[in-house]
Amino acid sequence: NKLAVALGIERTIVNRWFHERADPTAETVADIVKALKDINPTAAETFVELYLGELIKNEE
């Protein structure tokens, strides 16, 4: 709920992302990271690792 409020969207949209019924746009992914940093910085780091993990690993 906090993420939905921070992004100004309906909870059902976050629920769809969570249950992998829909994917956020690239722009929204950036907004999610920003919002999570304010809500819970550890969650923001985990999100980046889970969502972009393979991309990040390939660049290291």
Image: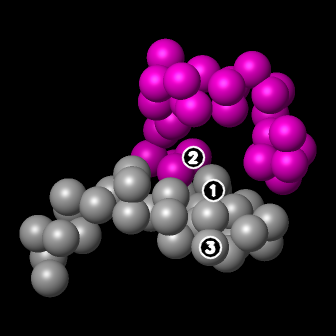
Considering depth in this image, is 45 or 28 the residue closer to the camera? Answer: 45
Residue found at x 52% / y 51%:
29
Q: Using a 10 Å C-alpha cutoff, classify the residue at mark 3 as few (fewer than 14 neighbours), some (14 to 19) or many (20 or more).
A: few
Q: Disc 3 marks which amino acid? A: Thr
In the rendered image, residue 27, in percent from the top left (x then y), is placed at: 52, 50
Q: Disc 1 marks which amino acid? A: Asp
Residue on which the image places disc 2: 28
Residue on which the image places disc 1: 31
In the rendered image, residue 55, in percent from the top left (x then y), is placed at: 21, 61
Residue 48: name its quadrant.
bottom left
Quadrant in the picture for the C terminus:
bottom left
The label nearer to you, 1 versus 3, is 3
Residue on which the image places disc 3: 42
Rendered position, 38 above or below 8: below
As helix, strand or loop, the secondary structure at mark 2 comes to: helix
Residues at discs 2 and 3 in contact (Cβ within 8 Å)? no
Residues at discs 1 and 2 in contact (Cβ within 8 Å)? yes
Residue found at x 78% / y 48%:
3
In the rendered image, residue 10, in percent from the top left (x then y), is placed at: 82, 27
Quadrant in the picture for the N terminus:
top right
> Does the magenta-highlighted stretch encompass residue 42?
no
Magenta range is: 1-29
Structural distance between the alpha carbons of marks 1 and 3? 16 Å
Q: Disc 2 marks which amino acid? A: Thr
Q: Is residue 34 visible?
A: no
What secondary structure is the magenta-colored segment mainly?
A: helix
Rendered position, 5 above or below 21: below
Structural distance between the alpha carbons of marks 2 and 3? 19 Å
